[in-house]
Amino acid sequence: MSTFQALISSWASELSIYEKQEAESVVSWLLEHHLGWRRTQILDEADVSSFPQQLFGDFERLKTGEPIQYIMGKGPFYGRDFFVSAATLIPRNETEELVHLIIKENPEAGLRILDIGTGTGCIPISLALEMNNPEVFAVDISEEALEVAKKNAEALNAKVTFSTCNILTQTPEVTPLDILVSNPPYIPEQEKAEMHKNVLDFEPGLALFVSNDDPLIFYKEIAKKGKQLLKLGGKLYFEINEKYGIQVAELMNELGYTEVKVLRDLNGKERIAAGRR
């Protein structure tokens, strides 16, 4: 028998790839998932012998660096839980900020919205549920990702029309749009050396990486196609690599977008670019 906090600290010490506080949060999340325990509860005793075997198996997976969201099959985003799989990126805080900005800036009813490279569907589903009766579409090149996105939309009772599309070679048939949003692949291959092992080894490279020769390839194609897809006055929103804010803004300006802006996230990094057709 041991105290609950001592158990968390002990298990967290075995997760060397995380900072101490993050490791303790991950362990708490795992215990809550399997046992229903929350750190806020007062639990003096932890009888390890009563734990289900799967909990120990999942803890071994954590030690390899596998993200807790993949182990549990879900991750939180904008106040809801979303299913995730090895075919999808894990929803992140920066993307929540993008969604929040779109909701805040677009209170009108009945807007037509397209998300490109949807992954789990966290962006279009959140917009469908939070905005004023929008008509929402989403595309992805990955059939496996789209299956996860459809599962999320069904579980959360969100009306989103999903379809397969390679945005580099195809143009979605969804005109005219009020809002076009995308969090496309934006990490050059050369930056792999700077990334955490748990991202490199487990998250889908298809959704992460672009060539060193043309790191803005998705922004160029999406912005060009946005000129066809968006209504006059419609808005384009991107999540961006913090290193390319100026370049993405220049690209949008060159293509004729107006009111182009680059915004910093809560950590002070340039992570959102937006403009108007």
Image (cartoon, rainbow, N blue to C red):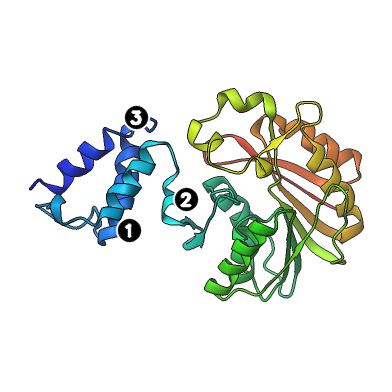
Task: Please tell me which residue is depicted at 15% across the width and 57% down the height of the picture.
Answer: 50
Q: Crowding at label 2, few (<14), some or many (≥20) Cα neighbours within 10 Å?
A: many
Left or right: where does residue 33 sit relative to residue 100? left
Sequence-earlier tag: 1 or 2:
1
Between 236 and 50, the one lying in front of the other is 50
Amino acid residing under circle 2: Tyr
- Distance CA(mark 3)–CA(mark 2): 18 Å
Name the residue carrying label 2.
70
Amino acid residing under circle 1: His
Mark 1: secondary structure: helix
Q: Quadrant of residue 122?
A: bottom right
Mark 2: secondary structure: helix
Name the residue carrying label 1.
33
Amino acid residing under circle 3: Ser
Task: Please tell me which residue is depicted at 53% across the width and 72% down the height of the picture.
Answer: 156
- Residue 175: x, y in percent? 87, 66
Left or right: where does residue 76 sit relative to residue 165? left
Residue 133 against residue 187 in the figure, above or below: below
Between 48 and 225, the one lying in front of the other is 48
- Distance CA(mark 1)–CA(mark 3): 21 Å
Can residue 173 be seen at all in this image of the molecule?
Answer: yes
Between 49 and 206, the one lying in front of the other is 49
Name the residue carrying label 3.
16
Task: Please tell me which residue is depicted at 70% across the width and 72% down the height of the picture.
Answer: 134
Between 133 and 206, the one lying in front of the other is 206
Task: Please tell me which residue is depicted at 71% across the width and 53% down the height of the picture.
Answer: 117
Residue 263 against residue 234 in the figure, above or below: above
Tell whether label 2 touches label 3 (CB within 8 Å): no
- Distance CA(mark 1)–CA(mark 2): 13 Å
Mark 3: secondary structure: loop
